[in-house]
Amino acid sequence: MAETGQSSETPSSPPSLSSDNSLNLNLTHHGKAYTFTLPHSSTLTDLSNSIHTTLSIPPPNQKLLITPKTGLLKSPFPSLPLSTLVSKKILLLAPTANELTALSQPTPPTSSTLKKTARPARHIDHQKIKDRATYTFQTLLPLQHLPNSSRSLAYLERLRSDPGIQTAMSTHKFRVGALTEMDPAEHTTHESRTLGLNRNRGEVIELRLRTDAYDGYRDYKIIRKTLCHELAHNVFGEHDRNFWDLTNQIEKEVERGDWKSGGRALTEEVFYNPNEVDGGGWTGGEFVLGGVGRSGEGLNRREAMAKAAEERIRRQREAGGGGAGGG
């Protein structure tokens, strides 16, 4: 069973054993912390059933983001012992019972909507409005346990409303379940820093918004470029030629669609924003800054930036001339 939820700005604390050998497991849902008390032998399926009983969220609507390492899990849940989740954070991604009820009921017309219907505005692309409401990030999730989570939310909202991002997502019909920020401490080693991560081809995209010292935020256009890379992972998992071609296409679409502050065109193929190129190694569905180069040497930030620019121009030239190189 679960205790009542309460607003919390701290991370879900690890599960603990009570005196009767039961397990107290904490998770966060919509900014509230909930404590579930279950037998020590319970599995993730038991937790899902308890969530259903307590929060009225059926298992098919539940997604559990468990970090670090375990990842995003959804129904049917594996028989994972809850005792293995010690020291992990659990985030429940699911609409509330009230939201589910609201979605199932039509919205009654109001006097203001009736007036607008009677006088349709000119030159409104209704299909474009519908597409942008459909092909978007369904949920924005700043990390509540880090300081200034409201600033992170504003950053994520800026990305979601970016005209270039909206254009690209509508063009490719991308729908992403959740866009969230990444905790730098959980994705940093001596050799590399992960800038972005796509889980299960668009169910969750994580972006490294903050600086390593948590004293500020990274450059917006660098983060936007990382987001372009992660969106390409909605289609291609491997970093092959098809993936790089799609990444380049999305980046150009974002630049062209950004009527607020578009980039400067160097050629018909390459868009470049001065002093805002980021680069490095790529692994799996992640964008990693400071990864290992082709010759095996570790690259610092300046070297990675220069190498990324050279590599991008080389790929574009090969694509234009029919070359057979890969990204």
Image (cartoon, rainbow, N blue to C red):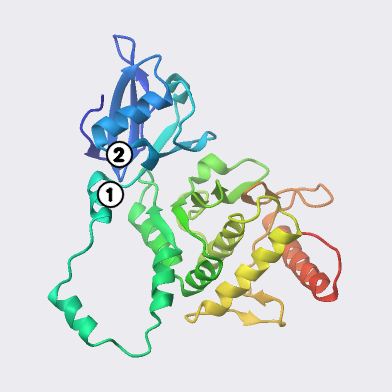
13, above or below 208, in the image = above
- Labels 2 & 1 near each other (Cβ < 8 A): yes
Residue most extreme to the top: 20
Badge 1 element: helix
- Front position in the image: 71 or 266: 71
Instruction: State the separation of the CA atoms marked 2 and 1.
Output: 9 Å
The crowding category of the residue bearing disc 2, from other C-alpha atoms within 10 Å (few below 14, some 14 to 19, many at least 20), is many
The answer to which image quadrant residue 140 occupies is bottom left
The quarter of the picture where the N terminus appears is top left
Residue at 81 percent across and 73 percent down: it is 317
- Percent position of residue 207, x then y: 51, 53
- Percent position of residue 229, x then y: 61, 59
65, above or below 104, in the image = above
The crowding category of the residue bearing disc 1, from other C-alpha atoms within 10 Å (few below 14, some 14 to 19, many at least 20), is some
- Front position in the image: 49 or 198: 49
267, above or below 251, in the image = below
Residue at image mark 1: 100
- Percent position of residue 158, x then y: 42, 66
Left or right position of 16 against 116 = right
Residue at 42 percent across and 76 percent down: it is 127
- Percent position of residue 79, x then y: 48, 23
Left or right position of 37 against 143 = left
Residue at 84 percent across and 62 percent down: it is 325
Specify the label residue 275 is tagged with: none
- Inspect the image, locate mark 2, and give the three-letter code of the amino acid beneath it: Ile
The quarter of the picture where the C terminus appears is bottom right
Residue at image mark 2: 57
